[in-house]
Structures are given as structure tokens and as C-alpha cells.
Image (cartoon, helix red, strand yellow):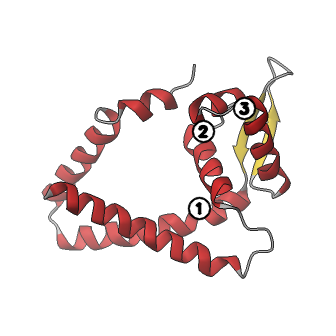
Amino acid sequence: MVEEIFAEVYDKFKLNFYRNIFQGFAKRESSLTATETFCVEVIHALDRPTINELGRFLELSQPNIAYKVNNLVKKGYVEKIQSEDDKREFFLEVTQKFHDYYDIKNEYMITVLERARERFSEEEMSQFQNILKVMSEELMPEITDDMKKD
């Protein structure tokens, strides 16, 4: 039962996000492909990865990931920042254009959490927060471990 409810909540967040993204396509001149969307979200989640770190995380070849990153740079969603220590290395940073796009996803999450705060007691919200924290930090090692910097 919990599996179905969790999947339902997850799907509703995704569906709201996708609907908002498709509604926004007409307003943007340079929209992202689905693959580019996923790639830039991974760059954001990894917090300034190098191209090598991104390639390792996504398990893609260097030429493949370089091609995807270059497209994101051309479209203005990512910047390559040269390392001060090793001039051959570049960190990937998302731009304000990405943050404007990303806010669409966060709007609905904030709305749902505000509704939850109105519906549930402080104690229940604290328990919910603790459950989410344990899920994120302890129950998802396949992702959490891969997100850590070398």
C-alpha cells in the first residue's frame, strides 16, 4: 500500500512539472530536449561537477557528455568555469536561466508543503521531515554515494 501511495505522490509531482514545462515551451525560444533537461538537473544536483564527474555519474563516454554539455552551454543553461588549480579542468555551473526554469518545479512542491503545514501538526511535520531526511541520507546510498565529490 505504501508503495502505491509513494508512487502516486511522485507521479503527481512529475506530472505537474511536465505540464508546466510544456506550457512554457511556447514562451521560450530555446527550450531543452528531454535529455538536456535531465542532464542539467543532474549538473545542478551534483553541485559544480567537473565534466569527468558528470560523465562518471551518468555512465556516459567523455565525447558523449562533452557534446551534451556544449549544447547546454550554447543554450545558456550551463557555464564552464575553469579551475584555478588545474587549468585543464572545468567545473559546470548552472546559470540564472536554469534557475528560472527550475523554479517551475519548486513552486508546486512549496504549495504542497504549505498545505501539509496547514493540515498536519508541528509534531507530524517534524516526523515527516525526519523520515525524509533518513530516506535521503541513509536509504538511497546508490545515489547519495555517487553525489559525493572525489
CB atoms of marks 3 and 2 within 8 Å: no
Q: Secondary structure at mark 1?
A: helix
Q: Secondary structure at mark 3?
A: helix
CB atoms of marks 1 and 2 within 8 Å: no
Q: Residue at x 34, y 70 (%)?
A: 112
Q: Which residue is mark 1?
A: 102
Q: Which mark is nearer the camera, 3 or 2?
A: 3
Q: Which mark is nearer the camera, 3 or 1?
A: 3
Which of the 4 quarters of the picture holds residue 50?
top right
Q: Is residue 30 above or below residue 78?
A: below
In the displayed structure image, the side of residue 56 where residue 64 appears, left or right: right
Q: Which residue is mark 3?
A: 51
Label 1 packing within 10 angstroms: few (<14), some (14-19), many (20+)? some
Q: Compare marks 1 and 2 and give the one earlier in the sequence.
A: 2
Image quadrant in which the C terminus is located:
top right
Give the Cα distance between marks 1 and 2: 14 Å
Inspect this view and state whether residue 8 appears: yes
Q: Residue at x 79, y 68 (%)?
A: 30
